[in-house]
Image: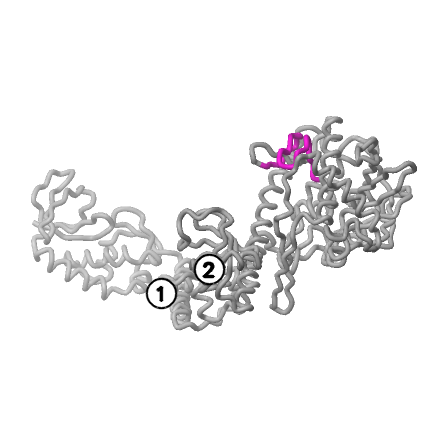
């Protein structure tokens, strides 16, 4: 005796070896024996053999038309044997029952399973929708296959899709992604290289920018419509003329300085910080914009500002205007000791915007104390002496040997200009900013007002709403407050400081959730912005190497297999470096495979630099 049964969703036929009512032991044509529950058995038959039976049943299944069966079934629930009898018009043979059951089982669009051998015809509208879906899926499958073949043949499909989003934030349910994924699986290429081979990446700088923009500016870098910034209330005019020091590309001029000479020697130094907090109240539309961006994004050749141009233009410390400012005044003696300090909210006349490009030539280590004359010479040289004293008092590490780089990019051509850090200009600006940030941080601490403090101990730097020492700078408290046009935490601190100046309740009280969240988000976002800047600097360094056809270059060993290329802010990993080379050893590299697409290059050790060559480099 044989049985027709279901096992693991498949219909089979086999010989009964033992019948125990609740279950049967069945032997398949392959010889495998299985224990089958009785309720899984549909038919018992004496002939033919299971293999011949299944062949005949499969023929019936294949010949039975699902649409015809659906029309014959009516609308009510039915048993498969009932439908088989109506289909054949007479008592069917056992293999015919089996064939109809398999057809019903394999037509879920047409028939809904309701129980053991029982089905219900799908409503006409459901069946029509299901058929349309099948047709659509077939068309989509064909489209995917066609696009895949084009990609494999290095042809970009006409698919009207954003290639950058496809690379960096794809919707994996879309046809273009499925085609790209299939092409990559077939060829073993990455999506980036696949699309590049098809000519989809015509601008590698735009590619790297897009990766960042899609993640952090998904709605674009523009600003929504905003009301014009309102003028702050009438402010007292300061009796000083201030000047700023920035590079030529700076539009967000946050800080400026003034010097008033005192009778008997010494000076009254003014540190003037732009005051956008006057026109950006907490919870306003502008505040929401700044809170979302958290900082200006800097990268070679461009930037994305935290605030709209109209707001920046309203509060930036531009020459020729009286600008709202939070001013710190310091009475400094002839020995550069600070005798008195006060903070004022006022309108400051900005007399000049000095620019690095011009000032570097006039005010440097070689010109200090010489007969060379230029605008603000006396003020700058005096401030340099004051700054040197401040630096010594902090016990700060000497940074004069550190190198900065300015990138100038025009029509795809890049110039990378080294600029030694720690110049007199840098020292003056840095020390006065550290002084303002640390003294205002101490003021907040002494008054018990929370702020955003930059704390550092044991080499680890973190932002916190409570003050702490900054070991690297050598100050007891440090609250970023000097760049409120560029950093959101500075804007928050400015609001807190203004509350002290105006003798009002601070916007953010102790354990303020908004302050905590802003600090957390700022740290994550600021790190991401800095990483993007480093990534784009690496990109333009690679472009410069190709542009200048550099195939050999000197480098300084950092440690192990890491080295920094001469004249560039570019660190490379070179496994070929001999083991045991000391840090700062100058070596030569042969460069190859410079690839701005992947930001990779190969640096092969080519020997040590000769002493004379090292000196000239």
The residue lying at 90 percent from left, 38 percent from top is: 262
- Label 2 belongs to which residue? 589
Pointers 1 and 2 in contact (C-beta within 8 Å): no
> In the rendered structure, does residue 210 fall within the stretch colored magenta?
no
Whether residue 477 appears in magenta in the rendering, the answer is yes
For image coordinates 40% across by 55% down, the residue present is 576
Count of picture labels: 2
Answer with the quarter of the image where residue 413 lies.
Answer: bottom right
- Of 580 and 124, nearer the camera is 580
Q: Is residue 76 left or right of residue 292?
A: left
Please tell me how crowded label 1 is: few (under 14), some (14-19), or many (20+) other residues with Cα within 10 Å: few
- The kind of secondary structure the magenta stretch mainly shows is loop
CA neighbours of label 2 inside 10 A, class few (<14), some (14 to 19), many (20+):
many
Q: As rendered, which of 75 and 111 lies closer to the eye? A: 111
Vertical side of 96 occupied by 479: above or below:
above
Q: Is residue 347 visible?
A: yes
Instruction: Find numbered disc 2 in the image and state the secondary structure of the residue it sits on.
Output: strand
Front disc: 1 or 2: 2
* Nearer the observer, 37 or 295: 295
Q: Position of residue 449 (x, y in %)?
A: 73, 29
Seen at 28% across and 57% down, the residue is 106
What distance separates the C-alpha of mark 1 from that of mark 2? Answer: 34 Å
**Residue 294: horizontal and vertical position, in percent?**
66, 46
């Amino acid at each position: 005796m044989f049985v027709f049964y279901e096992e693991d969703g498949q219909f089979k036929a086999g010989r009964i070896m033992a019948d125990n009512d609740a279950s049967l032991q069945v032997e398949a044509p392959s010889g495998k024996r299985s224990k089958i529950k009785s309720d899984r058995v549909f038919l018992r038959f004496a002939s033919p053999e299971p293999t011949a039976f299944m062949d005949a049943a499969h023929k019936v299944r294949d010949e039975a038309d699902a649409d015809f069966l659906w029309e014959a079934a009516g609308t009510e629930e039915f048993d498969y044997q009932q439908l088989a009898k109506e289909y054949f018009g007479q008592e069917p043979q056992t293999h015919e029952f089996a064939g109809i059951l398999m057809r019903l089982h394999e037509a879920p669009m047409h028939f809904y399973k309701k129980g053991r051998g029982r089905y219900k015809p799908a409503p006409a509208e459901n069946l029509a929708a299901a058929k349309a879906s099948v047709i659509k899926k077939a068309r989509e499958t064909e489209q995917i296959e066609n696009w895949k073949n084009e990609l494999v043949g290095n042809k970009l499909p006409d698919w009207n899709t954003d290639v950058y989003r496809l690379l960096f934030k794809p919707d994996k349910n879309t046809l273009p992604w499925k085609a790209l994924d299939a092409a990559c699986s077939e060829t073993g290429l990455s999506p980036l290289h696949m699309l590049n081979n098809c000519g989809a990446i015509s601008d590698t700088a735009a590619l790297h920018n897009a990766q960042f923009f899609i993640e952090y500016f998904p709605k674009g870098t523009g600003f929504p419509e905003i009301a014009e910034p309102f003028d702050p209330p009438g402010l007292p005019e300061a009796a000083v003329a201030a000047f700023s020091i920035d590079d030529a590309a700076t539009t967000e001029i946050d800080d400026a300085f003034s010097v008033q000479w005192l009778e008997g020697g010494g000076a009254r130094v003014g540190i003037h910080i732009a005051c956008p907090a006057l026109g950006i109240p907490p919870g306003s539309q502008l505040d929401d914009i700044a809170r979302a961006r958290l900082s200006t994004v800097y990268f070679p050749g461009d930037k994305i500002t935290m605030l709209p141009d109209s707001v920046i233009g309203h509060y930036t410390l531009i020459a020729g205007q009286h600008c709202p400012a939070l001013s710190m005044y310091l009475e400094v003696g002839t020995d550069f000791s600070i005798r008195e300090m006060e903070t004022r909210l006022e309108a400051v006349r900005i007399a000049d915007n000095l620019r690095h490009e011009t000032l570097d030539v006039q005010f440097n280590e070689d010109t200090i104390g010489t007969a060379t004359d230029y605008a603000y010479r006396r003020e700058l040289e005096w401030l340099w002496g004051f700054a040197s004293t401040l630096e010594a008092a902090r016990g700060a590490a000497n940074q004069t040997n550190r190198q900065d780089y300015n990138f100038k990019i025009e029509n795809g051509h890049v110039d990378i200009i080294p600029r030694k850090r720690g110049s007199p200009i840098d020292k003056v600006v840095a020390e006065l900013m550290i002084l303002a940030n640390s003294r205002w941080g101490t003021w907040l601490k002494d008054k018990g007002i929370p702020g955003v403090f930059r704390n550092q101990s044991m080499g680890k730097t973190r932002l916190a709403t409570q003050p702490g020492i900054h070991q690297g700078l050598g100050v007891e408290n440090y609250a970023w407050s000097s760049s409120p046009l560029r950093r959101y935490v500075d804007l928050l601190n400015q609001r807190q400081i203004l509350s002290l100046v105006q003798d009002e309740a601070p916007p953010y009280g102790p354990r303020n959730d908004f302050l905590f969240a802003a600090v957390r988000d700022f740290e994550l976002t600021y790190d991401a912005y800095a990483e993007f800047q480093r990534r784009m600097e690496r990109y333009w360094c690679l472009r410069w190497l190709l542009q200048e056809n550099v195939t050999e270059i000197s480098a300084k060993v950092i440690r192990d297999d890491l080295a920094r290329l001469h004249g560039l802010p570019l660190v490379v990993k070179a496994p070929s470096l001999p083991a045991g080379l000391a840090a700062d050893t100058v070596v030569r590299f042969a460069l190859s495979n410079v690839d701005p697409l992947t930001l990779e290059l190969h640096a092969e050790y080519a020997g040590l630099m000769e002493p004379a060559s090292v000196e000239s480099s």
